[in-house]
Image (tube, grey):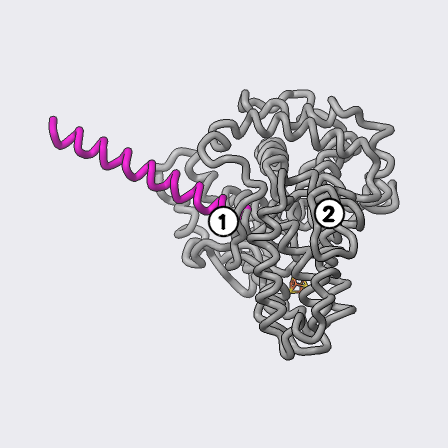
Amino acid sequence: MLDPFGREARKIVKDEFGGITELLMVIPSYVGIDAALERVRWINSGEVPKGILELDDVRDLLTFYALLGALAFSPYGLEMELVKEASLGIYSLKIETAETMEGTSVPLEAVRGDYIPPRDRAILERTHHTELSPEEKKNLRLEYRIHLSKFLELWDGSLKEVYIRKGYAYLTRGQAVELWKRAFERNFDRAVNLLYEVRDELPGYYFRLYEELGKIAREHFKERLEKMGRAEAQPLRFDLFPPCVKMALGGVPAGLRNYAITVLLTSFLSYARICPNPPRRDVRIRDCVQDLSVVEKEIMPIIIEAGNRCSPPLFEDQPHEIKNIWYHLGFGLTDKPTLEDSGNSPWYFPPNCSKIRANAPELCKPDRDCRNIKNPLTYYLRKLYLENRKRKENEQAEGAENEGKGAGMEGEGK
Ligand code: SF4
């Protein structure tokens, strides 16, 4: 199996198992937890075990989806980074040694002889440059083409790097692999979001697998964790909130107030601040904090201010709504809660986007980051994840630049 999101894989999932959810239900009877973990355990050695590369297609798919199922419990956590990194390693290797990349999730087509005028080909592939080795020439060969509309969805490099003709982008194998990696990350993202919605229905097997993944991930990312601390409960980043939550924060008109403030904002802020990756839906606030200060000093003031910005202000004509807020936080109907009250009512989870659109369509004004998102909380987690990744890349680039400067100065001094 070259690509677990490719044509062939999709066909197996649909025809042989009846869909992704059905596939996840049968995986525990076929794949032991250790077998699934084999796919990530090699990561510190840097060498993919031969046995993983040689798995037959169905086994490969089952073990890969076992890990995806486990990630439903922590989208955008360290576990996801681990599985993504290991899976990219495995499938990149398979793709490198495969004869063709056709059939992967990127709609690539092998280039036929008459697609490119001979003069263009001679210039682009430097066919007459005798100083180039056969390997270098191979790397310059335009092997695939892809329709421009599909290409532009994935490519974020310069268009100058690519030969474009009659509505197609022509790619070397290296460029095609880069494009495939982007498609893989995007498909991975989509799958994790999709599974997040069904995690309550998943067998306990996946939670156990998730816990084991967590141990390996913490070991693998030890250095980073020591530097930054675990990216779980942390101060709220308002700039990364989804549009619906930003709208609720700004205050809304009468018909929307209760839904925007009590249902959406209360659940979103509390989970985002206290327990962004709840391991299960029946988690209580007292499972996540030692005292109520974070709720009383950070979360409640934001909710009350947003309620005051509504027109008319929510708590002026509905003062009892405060009790309802505590109810939605899991403390029962009260306005003087103690930590021990947590669990007297359910701690409401942020509603899915489909529910928001059905109950308060005015709140949903999606931006480009809402694509494939099923819940406002995953929108936020994804943005946090991307921010952390960007920061890490910048730090690495700065580190490399400083090293370069250091080396330059050493050279000058000699
Ligand atoms: S798509 Fe979801 S996250 Fe985005 S604005 Fe709509 S409800 Fe909010």
- Badge 2 marks a residue whose secondary structure is helix
Name the image quarter holding the N terminus: top right
Compare residues 225 and 165 and report the one nearer the observer: 225
**Three-letter residue code for mark 2:** Tyr
Is 300 placed above or below 87 here? below
Residue 196: assigned label? 2
Quadrant assignment, res 283: top right
Q: Is residue 390 magenta?
A: yes
Name the image quarter holding the C terminus: top left
Compare residues 158 and 241 and report the one nearer the observer: 241
Compare residues 351 and 18 and report the one nearer the observer: 351
Residue at which label 1 appears: 387
The residue located at (75%, 39%) in the rendering is: 69
The residue located at (76%, 33%) in the rendering is: 207
Q: Which residues are magenta?
A: 385-414
Q: CA distance from mark 1 to mark 2?
A: 21 Å
* Beta carbon of the mark 1 residue lies under 8 A of ligand 1: no
Q: Position of residue 305 (x, y in %)?
A: 57, 66
Q: Which is the main secondary structure of the residues drawn in magenta?
A: helix
Task: Answer with mark 1 or mark 2, whichever residue precedes in sequence.
Answer: 2
The residue located at (47%, 28%) in the rendering is: 223
Quadrant assignment, res 372: bottom right
Tell me if I can see residue 97 in this picture. Answer: no
The residue located at (83%, 40%) in the rendering is: 23
Q: Residues within 10 Å of mark 1 (few under 14, many from 20)?
A: few
Q: Is residue 406 magenta?
A: yes
**Three-letter residue code for mark 1:** Glu
Q: Tell me which image quadrant ligand 1 sits in.
A: bottom right
Is 128 placed above or below 163 here? above
Q: Position of residue 387 (x, y in %)?
A: 49, 49
Q: Position of residue 300 (x, y in %)?
A: 61, 57
